[in-house]
Image: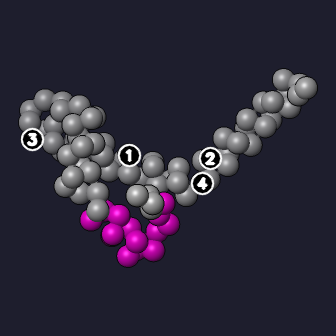
Amino acid sequence: MKTIDEMASSQGEDSQFVKNSVLYKEFLAEREEILKHKWIESEKAGSDIGFEKALLDWIVKHRSHWRDKRVKEGRPTARATS
């Protein structure tokens, strides 16, 4: 059985692995774009539109172009298989 120190060390290594993964970095970049979109659309609407509405709107209107642009720039992407 692992000690508390060993478990904490293992979790720290796992956390660092996740933070360095391409998938996590892609998630953070996409989230940032969604939050920018939320701010812009909320300003236009005159009130907060909420994250879910901003997310769905951004996916429909901007996601594919944003991903294509990242690929052309040579940024690593984590493409979905579906």
Q: Is residue 12 magenta?
A: no
Across and down, in percent, residue 18 comes to 62, 47
Q: What stretch is highlighted in magenta?
A: 65-78
The residues tagged by marks 2 and 1 sit, at their Cα atoms, a distance apart of 16 Å
Q: Which residue is under mark 1?
A: 31
Question: Where residue 8 sits in the image (x, y, percent)?
Answer: 78, 30
Spatial distance from mark 4 to mark 3, Cα to Cα?
35 Å
Residue 46, given in percent of the width and then of the height, sits at 9, 32
The residue lying furthest to the top in this view is 4
Q: How crowded is mark 1: few (under 14 residues within 10 Å), some or many (20 or more)?
A: few
Picture residue at 45% right of the left edge, 49% below the top: 27
* For the residues bearing labels 2 and 1, Cβ distance under 8 angstroms: no
Chain-order first, disc 2 or disc 3: 2
Label 4, secondary structure: give it.
loop
Residue 21 is marked as 4
Tell me whether circle 4 and circle 3 mark residues in contact (CB < 8 Å).
Answer: no
> Sequence order check: which comes first, mark 3 or mark 1?
1
Residue highlighted by disc 2: 18
The residue where tag 3 is placed is: 44
Q: Which of marks 1 and 4 is nearer the N terminus?
A: 4
- CA separation, marks 3 and 1? 20 Å
Q: Is residue 15 left or right of residue 44?
A: right
Alpha carbon distance from label 2 to label 4: 5 Å
Specify the quadrant that holds the C terminus: bottom left
